[in-house]
Amino acid sequence: MIDAIRCVKLNSFWWAIVLVPLLFISGAVGEGRASGHINMITIDGSINPASADFLIQAIEASEEDGAVALLIELDTPGGLVSSSQDIIKAMLNAEVPTIVYVTPRGAWAASAGMFITIAANVAVMTPGSSIGAAHPVGLGGSGGSGGGGKEDEEGESSGGRDISMEKAENLLASYVESIAKHRDRNVEWVVDAVRNSVAVGADEALEIGVIDLIAPDREALLEAINGREVEIASGSVILEVEGATVKPLEMTLLQSIFNFLADPNVAVILLLAGLMGLYIEFNNPGLIVPGVAGAVCLVLTGFALQILPFDWVGLLLMIVGLGLLIAEVFITSFGLLFAAGIGCFLLGGTMVFEQPELSDLTVSFWSVLFPTVLALGAFSAIVVFAVGRTLLSDQQSGVDELVGSLGKATTSISSGSVGKVFIRGEYWNARTDESVSEGDSVEVLAVEGLKLVVRRVPGSV
């Protein structure tokens, strides 16, 4: 009996030795899962080198800090093709699952945003959002998909479709098709979004297999994807996001500045402000503030043009247009230079960022370019009116303005001699062709250097 009791105690002792460490290990594992986190970034604006660098750094940070996944909240009208390719390459080769969430309500994943959405491991949209419209942008912000023109023998379009637009369309269609196949999404629709610029809402996107699910908020999204199996670069993983905390990642100050500058509308406004600032400074030396502000705007424009692909012809047309408006101030052309300047500026503005094979970003004609040109035209018209009015008015300063002024002789002046006169608070040497007595009123006839030619005012005492 005693031996049996000793045996039981011994077995209990060994079980305790085995089970206690296991309990500690399981507790540590459970604690680690509970403290897991999801990194989150927000892209609200164009897809450009700054936002691409931000997203790629977020992927790298998520791989390094052991994040369960990277959540990308997206709302974009599109952007640069090169930046989109950099982002997609990083997403497809990431060692951390990527989740793209098109949010908030009313958001859209247009053009480059659509490419990024379908490249994610999990593509989610909020109700009321939309996706698509990925056709390359042409002149004036319109796509060139519907020309209907016949192609000539060399394959160039004789109608509405341009050869460069067709080339960009084919490249993007092939690119997006390969992404859709890799992520097992609706290949036919995404190709149609590139070729015909189709777009759909969240419900239809889910129905046709463009996205994985619809979620009204972030909490519902995480609950819906928990336990989902996804494919990353190293193999399949299970998303264990239940109880995970969301850790926001922010852009650096430099990334925020370049993200702001990478907007064609901002670049055009900065260019105009810079040129006008320098023009004002050159015409009014010493003001300093317009010159410094103009120089800063042009430096920022230079940074923007380093980020955005631009057309030299469009940029030169804008500069020529501004030059013609300035020339109208000095040359009487009855408004011809003014009209030509406005036309050149508008045409150049629509062309300056027209690079369909590189970007789908353009200057907004009605909300930015037209009001800017209208304000510039109004400013030029005011300057022309002010200068014309000044030229027609009597001279108000300078020695020549003394001609016709009235004064009083302070000494007697005989014909051919020089005496003193007092005019407008100043004493002047004066000569006359007639005798003038001291105290007589005199009128200035001419200015000869520092000497006045005067005559006696008839009827003066």
Image (cartoon, helix red, strand yellow):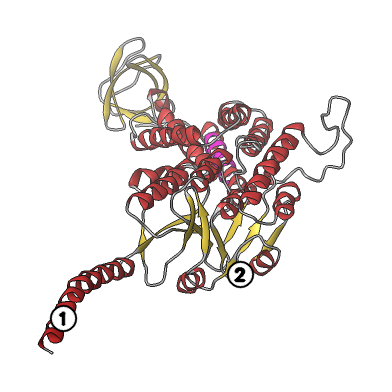
- The one of 354 and 313 positioned closer to us in this rendering: 354
Q: Quadrant of residue 453?
A: top left
Badge 2 marks a residue whose secondary structure is loop
Type of amino acid under label 1: Cys
Most distant residue in the top direction: 416
Residue highlighted by disc 2: 128
Q: 10 Å neighbourhood of mark 1: few (<14), some, or many (≥20)?
A: few
Residue 400 position, x and y percent, is: 42, 23
Judge left or right: residue 36 versus residue 359: left
Question: Disc 2 to disc 1, how far (Cα)?
Answer: 70 Å
Q: Viewer-nearest of labels 2 and 1?
A: 1
Residue at position x 88%, y 25% in the image: 153
Q: Is residue 414 left or right of residue 241?
A: left
Say the numbered circle drawn on residue 7: 1
- Residues shaded magenta: 375-387
Where in the figure is residue 168, as x and y percent of width and height?
A: 69, 37
Spot the residue most to the left. Answer: 2
Amino acid carrying label 2: it is Gly
Q: Is residue 392 visible?
A: yes
Identify the disc placed on residue 56: none
- Whether the magenta-drawn stretch holds residue 318 is answered as no
Q: Nearer the viewer, residue 353 or 167?
A: 167
- Most frequent secondary structure within the magenta stretch: helix
In the image, residue 126 lies at what x, y percent?
A: 56, 68
- Please say if 302 is above or below 362: above
Q: Considering the numbered disc 1 on the image, is that residue within a helix, a strand or a loop?
A: helix
